Amino acid sequence: MLISVASTLALAVVVWVFVVRTPGWAQVQASFFDGEVMLAALPRVWDGFLLNLRVLATASVLILVVALVIAGVRTLRGPIWLPLRALAAGYTDLFRGTPLIIVLYLVGFGIPGLGLLPTRLPFEFWGTVALTLTYSAYVAEVFRAGIDAVHPSQRHAARALGLSHAKTMRLVVVPQAVRKVTPALMNDLVALQKDVGLVSVLGAVDAVRAAQIETAAFFNFSPYVLAGLLFVLLAIPTIRLTDWYTARVRAREQIGGIV
């Protein structure tokens, strides 16, 4: 306990010396941590944050569905499925290698520019599509790792009982795979919660874009800090839940439980 107290005090002294006691701290505090500006900007930033939440909720569901389909295609056996496996592998390679912001530009401005749709869809929609395309590639690899981690005897036993390949995957393999990769999936969700703020590059008035507007109005950067705090408050429960679940899985593995 004494060591913990001493180390905490030492950290506080370091922060005080290298942050609070610096010559420019007063100016930085006024430019980034002005409570009155944050309070004035809160309504518009909150409205934009609700857009981020809508994108997050929609994209999360779509990502799980698309990623599971891609992972299932990549685990198909037999030469007849080679074209589909190659297409799925190419998809994951492409979108894991392309920066998300480039995907946002290509989807948000490129697809509407083709003129295929009769009406102009909001940038919120295209941002959701871009996030789904990119994160599905990552989550599909997580699912595939979980499916490959299920022992082959599980598949053999299911087929011996007369289950088809589809039922074997749905009833036997996928439930076990999901339990194995849940911590990794939750970490991807935390990353997605941050990246939904990138839809602002398309012009959608989300929390980041609203903070930019308020920053220009007040000539103060505190709205950006406010938007960042909202994203942190959104991520903390998921992070704590991920830590708890990871510790729970580790404890069950150490005692020989079935996970």
Image: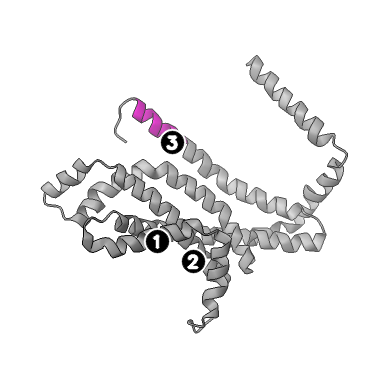
* Among the 4 quarters of the image, the one containing residue 12: top right
Residue located 57% across and 64% down the image: 102
Mark 3: few/some/many CA within 10 Å (<14, 14-19, 20+) = some
Q: State which quarter of the image contains the C terminus.
A: top left
Tell me where the magenta segment starts and ends, as one range. 244-254
Q: How is the image coloured?
A: one colour
Mark 1: few/some/many CA within 10 Å (<14, 14-19, 20+) = few
Mark linked to residue 167: none
Q: Is residue 121 visible?
A: no
- Magenta highlight on residue 33: no
Residue 6, given in percent of the width and then of the height, sits at 70, 19
Q: State which quarter of the image contains the N terminus.
A: top right
Closer to the camera, 97 or 169? 97
Mark linked to residue 246: 3
Tell me which amino acid carries mark 3. Answer: Thr
Closer to the camera, 129 or 241? 129
Q: CA distance from mark 3 to mark 2?
A: 30 Å
Residue 29, given in percent of the width and then of the height, sits at 81, 45
Q: Earlier in the sequence, mark 3 or mark 1?
A: 1
Q: Earlier in the sequence, mark 2 or mark 1?
A: 1
